Image (tube, helix red, strand yellow):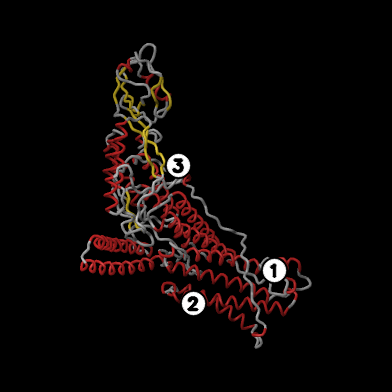
Amino acid sequence: FLCAAGCNPLAETGRSKLQNQRAALNQQILKAVRLRTGAENLLRATTNNKVREQALLELSFVNSDLQILKEELEGLNISVEVYQNTGETFSIPLIPLGLKETKEGDFTIPLKDFILEHYSEDSSDYEDEIADLMDLRQACRTPSRDESGIEMLMSYFIQLGFVENRFFPPTRQMGILFTWYDSFTGVPVCQQNLLLEKASILFNIGALYTQIGTRCNRQTKPGLENAVDAFQRAAGILNYLKETFTHTPSYDMSPAMLSVLVKMMLAQAQECVFEQISLPGIRNEFFTLVKMAQEVAKVGEVYTLVNTAMNQAPVKANIPYSWSNMAKIKSDHYKALAHYFVATLLSDHQLHPSDDEDKQEKAWFQLHDCMPEGLTSLTILRDKVQRKRLGKAHLRKAIVYHEEALRVCGLCKKLRNIDILQEILTVAHKRSLIKYAQHEQEDDFLSLMEASSVLPKTEHKVEMIVPEFSKVKVKDFFERLGPLPVFSAKQRWTVPRTINFHCQERGLGFTLKGGPPVQVHCLDPECSAALKGLKEGDYIVSINGLDSKWLEVNDVLEKFKSMRENDIEIKVISCQDTMHNKSATYSVGMQKTYSLICLAMEEDKIHETKKATPKLSFLSWGTKNRQKAASTLCLPYAVAGSSQTKKKMDSRLTVLDTESSLY
């Protein structure tokens, strides 16, 4: 099994300092959140004008404080230089995602109680397994920024699947509170729902992939290949999170936000692809320049889409302002490079008799969706004057885009302080100005021509890489409880019964089937075991004090055969009923915004819910790949239940309703 060891949280590395600052900011935001919630409640409750004025003043102060804290958190999210490769680089910084923070939690008491109550086993025997689970969770709070960190997070995610099936029945809550902080707003989300834990771990896997991608050395081919792979995997994880977990009560994991993050990761992967192509150098040759112009235009196009998505509601209100500015800067910068390459191939190359005219014409035609009025592709290629005019038009457009990128960078305080970004934008701008000055003439104003956009095209389209959880081999910590399909939280069992019997001359008096564990079948009611209380359908879990939950039929028969002349003691259990999930759509009376108490219902609505028992309201956000559909409320029913069972389930659902409110 993978060793559960994360990074040292006290290590004075740049990344650990950022995460510590993020954790401290989250606590300050939590404090301000509580103050704002109190002021809002006081404002709703009071009718005294003086008290209302004081509450409004307090609310105004707290909102201002929250805005300042949010800006500080945004500053951490744009601290991209900390995550970049430490070597000498001359590349535009990439944007990583920060890890979501969580509170420490102890599952020991709820899990031990459930083992004793549900599985009728001594819970003290499982203290080591519970401790291993807690150690793994603690290590996942500070994963190393490499493949071992990814593997550890994935192993915990898979382990949570085992834990969910073992300990989380569909009829009631376990009393374990999971708290995770929003990566962008710092607002805490608290739930007694294991799905919040699973979704947050998935988000952190995607975030860790982005940090691995930004750390790669982009001055080498292997480094760029690793960066492309990391961003594609990050996009795949985030897309899996979006499609699998719906209605997550956190802005950073909302479908709209995840869609934007997926686009951003694919755009950064496409950017690395262009850097990979241009790494050996760009030859000043006609067809090479055509290819590079279209490749870099593709990068500009994807960043334009990212910038557009970032400025749409509801994402615009929560995504860091500097991120949308960075997307805008890269969109303009790479579009400028595309026009610069086209201008270079027009001004530095002439059509010679030895050149393949048809091939050049076809390549030029694919560069644009339209030609300048009155001109054809062949005319431009043959006419030296027209080539020069159009080349200068593309240079003018390149200069305009460069200047726009510099302007946007100058308006953003956070980006203005990133020296490498300023330097790259300035160098590219000066290069276009110098080339334009080489062809400048006094009568240029008489021969202005409008350059059309460069059509984007790539031979290396990036795609999301679907997460491969099956490659991570994980052993179920609680394997000793028995085979998971049988010994799960959905199954109800009787307390183990001890049966002492002896073999008769004609045999055991019953046959066995299934397994593991094996089940009693075709029981003779007159046999020794039946007379001592054995029933058909019982599962054999112990033979003479030895655990037999994992034994097959042949193994159990061999043990019985070896004890033929002696009394046999077995322990058996009977299945009472099986709890299933029935899907029923039900909408919760939520607040209009993701409030600071994380979608908690108002007190008057809770009071009305307690009075009206037929309608049960509690937050449900589930997985699409469960038994029915996502975003539905899972209601249990018993296959072999009675009216008494139904009453018990109703009471449990009522408890679940009141306990499932978020903090």
Q: Quadrant of residue 454?
A: bottom right
Mark in the foreground, 3 or 2:
3
Give the CA separation, mark 3 to mark 2: 52 Å
Counting other residues with Cα less than 10 Å from the Cα at mark 3, is it few (<14), some (14-19), or many (20 or more)? Answer: some
- Quadrant location of the C terminus? bottom left
Disc 2: which residue: 407
Three-letter code for the amino acid on which mark 2 is drawn: Arg
Mark 1: secondary structure: helix
Mark 3: secondary structure: loop
Give percent across and percent down for residue 593: 36, 59
**Outermost residue to the bottom:** 442
Closer to the camera, 647 or 91? 647
Disc 1: which residue: 364
Viewer can see residue 550: yes
Position of 647 relative to 320 (above/below) = above
Q: Which mark is residue 628?
A: 3
Q: Earlier in the sequence, mark 1 or mark 3?
A: 1
Q: Which mark is residue 205?
A: none
Looking at the image, how many numbered discs can be counted on the residues?
A: 3
Mark in the foreground, 1 or 3:
3
Q: Residue at x 63, y 83 (%)?
A: 438
